[in-house]
């Protein structure tokens, strides 16, 4: 069984809006709806686990999930204090006896494609872990705490990580439980697997697969849709 865990438990404080960013409208639909529809249409995905803030579960079901009339089984799971906690809650909600691969995706990346999800799944089946990434176009500068440049970093072989990120279930559970035991946190799930000493395959994503975190991102996303 292949499960998609869509993480949408963030507070969205950078949007400076009363409504969480994942619920803001993009061309008339909540941002989160686009991610749900993409994974619902992906034939490789068997079920979807949607992780949202505890107090938003009823709101999400009534206002986002139900109106979409999705084909796949959807489970709503309460999120945790941090993203890593929310992903772990999603992993715990998966069918542990049947789970083979899990695909973890940020709910505020509305332009994920079925092809990108399929590429990550194929990579996870072969290597155990596979994520999307895109090349860095800009020059990279390392700065000190005072805001002065310390060095210019070589951008060769540097990629910006995206989601979805796909893993064999047993591997990603082991990685998360290791992090919980040792008390460390990372900004993406691949980092937790790397800490175990396991290899993570990376395949090229797309610049369209943006993460909406600010008003400027929302304007850009609207332009992409138009």
Image: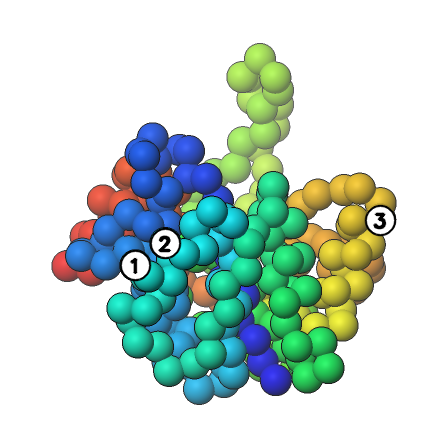
Q: Are marks 2 and 1 in contact (CB under 8 Å)?
A: yes
Vertical position of residue 169 compared to residue 218: above or below: below
* Label at residue 59: 2
Q: Quadrant of the N terminus?
A: bottom right
Residue 162 drawn at (x, y percent): 50, 57
Way the structure is coloured: rainbow
The residue that label 1 is drawn on is: 63
The residue lying at 45 percent from left, 65 percent from top is: 205
The residue lying at 72 percent from left, 65 percent from top is: 172
* Label at residue 29: none
Rounded to the nearest whole Å, what is the CA distance between mark 3 and mark 2?
A: 33 Å
The residue that label 3 is drawn on is: 181
Q: Earlier in the sequence, mark 1 or mark 3?
A: 1
Crowd class of label 3 (few under 14; some 14 to 19; many from 20; radius 10 Å): few
Residue 98 drawn at (x, y percent): 68, 84
Vertical position of residue 38 compared to residue 43: above or below: above
């Amino acid at each position: 069984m292949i499960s998609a865990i869509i993480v949408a438990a963030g507070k969205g404080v950078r949007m400076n809006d009363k409504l969480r960013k994942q619920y803001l409208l993009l061309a008339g639909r909540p941002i989160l709806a686009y991610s749900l529809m993409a994974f619902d249409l992906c034939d490789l995905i068997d079920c979807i686990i949607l992780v949202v803030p505890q107090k938003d579960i009823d709101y999400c079901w009534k206002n986002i999930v139900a109106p979409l009339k999705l084909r796949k089984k959807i489970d709503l799971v309460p999120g945790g204090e941090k993203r890593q906690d929310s992903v772990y809650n999603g992993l715990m909600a998966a069918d542990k006896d049947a789970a083979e691969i899990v695909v973890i995706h940020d709910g505020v990346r509305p332009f994920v494609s079925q092809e990108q999800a399929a590429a990550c799944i194929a990579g996870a089946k072969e290597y155990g872990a596979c994520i999307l990434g895109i090349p860095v176009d800009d020059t990279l500068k390392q700065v000190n705490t005072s805001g002065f440049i310390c060095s210019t970093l070589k951008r060769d072989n540097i990629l910006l990580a995206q989601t979805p990120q796909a893993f064999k279930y047993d591997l990603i559970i082991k990685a998360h439980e290791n992090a919980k035991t040792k008390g460390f946190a990372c900004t993406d799930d691949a980092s937790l697997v790397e800490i175990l000493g396991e290899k993570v395959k990376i395949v090229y994503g797309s610049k369209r697969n943006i993460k909406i975190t600010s008003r400027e991102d929302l304007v850009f996303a609207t332009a992409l849709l138009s």
